[in-house]
Image (cartoon, coloured by chain):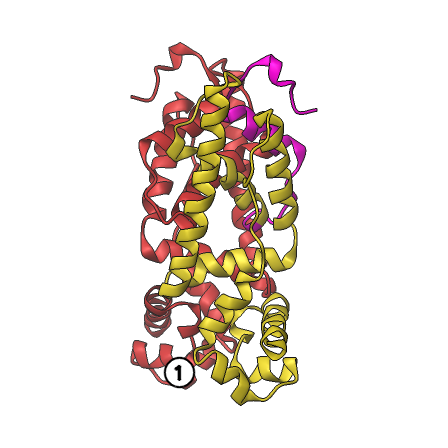
Chain colours: A yellow, B red
Amino acid sequence: VRSREAILNAARELLTRDGPAAVTHIKVAEHAGTGRATVYRHWPRSEQLLADAMAAVPMPFFNTPTGPVRQWIYNELTALGRELNRRDVRAVATTLANSALWDAEMANRRERFATTLADRVAKALAAASDAGEVTLRTSARSAAALAIGPIYYRSTIESGTVDDDLIATIVEALGTWHDRSGGHA
Amino acid sequence: VRSREAILNAARELLTRDGPAAVTHIKVAEHAGTGRATVYRHWPRSEQLLADAMAAVPMPFFNTPTGPVRQWIYNELTALGRELNRRDVRAVATTLANSALWDAEMANRRERFATTLADRVAKALAAASDAGEVTLRTSARSAAALAIGPIYYRSTIESGTVDDDLIATIVEALGTWHDRSGGHA
């Protein structure tokens, strides 16, 4: 188990430092200080090793809504922006989007990730709508893309920091929030 | 010139079919039917060849605003969604976002791309605001992320089609459009 952890850590460090092409059996074994045979035994394919190393980066966003939802979404988007400001998280997110085009295992992970986030965002907004906290401007199927898309684009394409202005703009775009929700100050 | 074009086409085909790791001097030379020395002479580094192959995919979005701007943005976002539905465009966009983390040349291209799009979107929205067509809900620095981010996320993470619902949601999120603009039907 310890060598497995050491190998996964080494793979993630190489991914972050040098990119996905650096996650080879040879380099990971060297970096982890283990034998190559050990790496091959656990992960016959280096793509699988890369995928498992990436899975260690947690994606705990939009998990447990607490009211008021407006403030909660604001906080979750802030946390997401902070995570995507980390080099290793950007490396994982963009490697996933890229390698999923050619690797079925990565495509499955991307699919699960996107579906989970979309379900969570839709559920939280539906609850806020039912409670009379918001009159939604988005459909459930557009909500995740509208909420997460700008933060993902700002981080991975604009290579910029997710600021309060962008988050506030997103929160207001999702719907008309009624005053008793208390704002997000 | 002709061998240069053939090499770039071969590189782009390999990128689209097998991913960025397939864009090596050896494979590109084989696929283009040229000698390896020719490929090395034009592109000593394979990263440079990949970057040049990607540059051949045009990004003509948000270029020349025509009024009413609401309809124009709707059309531009539709065109962007259609482009990102193409496998080669997704390959280029996600390879750029990924490889820019480790390659300065790619980071420059990503930067130019993001800055150009952000300037164009901001300029068009400012013109519409000045003309009284819209009361903006976004700042100039958030507009591009809000407009393009959801489409990019839908295409590259949700791996879905950009539909009219998403585009209409984005257009309405940008601001309050005044009726004389004629809607986007």
Q: Is residue B24 left or right of residue A22?
A: left
Classed neighbour count for the residue bearing mark 1: other residues with Cα under 10 Å, few (<14), some (14–19), many (≥20): some
Q: Quickly name the residue at label 1.
A: B26
Residue B167 in the image: state x and y as whole percent: 38, 31
* Above or below, comparing residue B139 to residue A105 in the picture: above
Q: Secondary structure at mark 1?
A: helix
Look at label 1 and name its amino acid.
Ile
Residue B152 shown in magenta: no
Residue A163 shown in magenta: yes
Give whichever of B82, B42 is nearer the camera: B82
Q: Point out the image quarter for the N terminus of chain B.
A: bottom left
Tell me, yes or no, if residue B55 can be seen here.
Answer: no
- State which region is magenta: A156-185
Image quarter for residue A64? top right
Residue A136 in the image: state x and y as whole percent: 45, 22
Q: Point out the image quarter for the C terminus of chain B.
A: top left
Query: Which residue: 64% across, 42% down?
Result: A79
Image quarter for residue B126? top right
Image quarter for residue B67? top left
Query: Which residue: 58% across, 68% down?
Result: A15
Residue B38 in the image: state x and y as whole percent: 41, 81
Query: Which residue: 56% across, 28% down?
Result: A171
Q: Is residue A112 left or right of residue A184?
A: left
Tell me, yes or no, if residue B25 can be seen here.
Answer: yes
* Above or below, comparing residue B85 to residue A141 in the picture: below
Residue A37 in the image: state x and y as whole percent: 52, 89
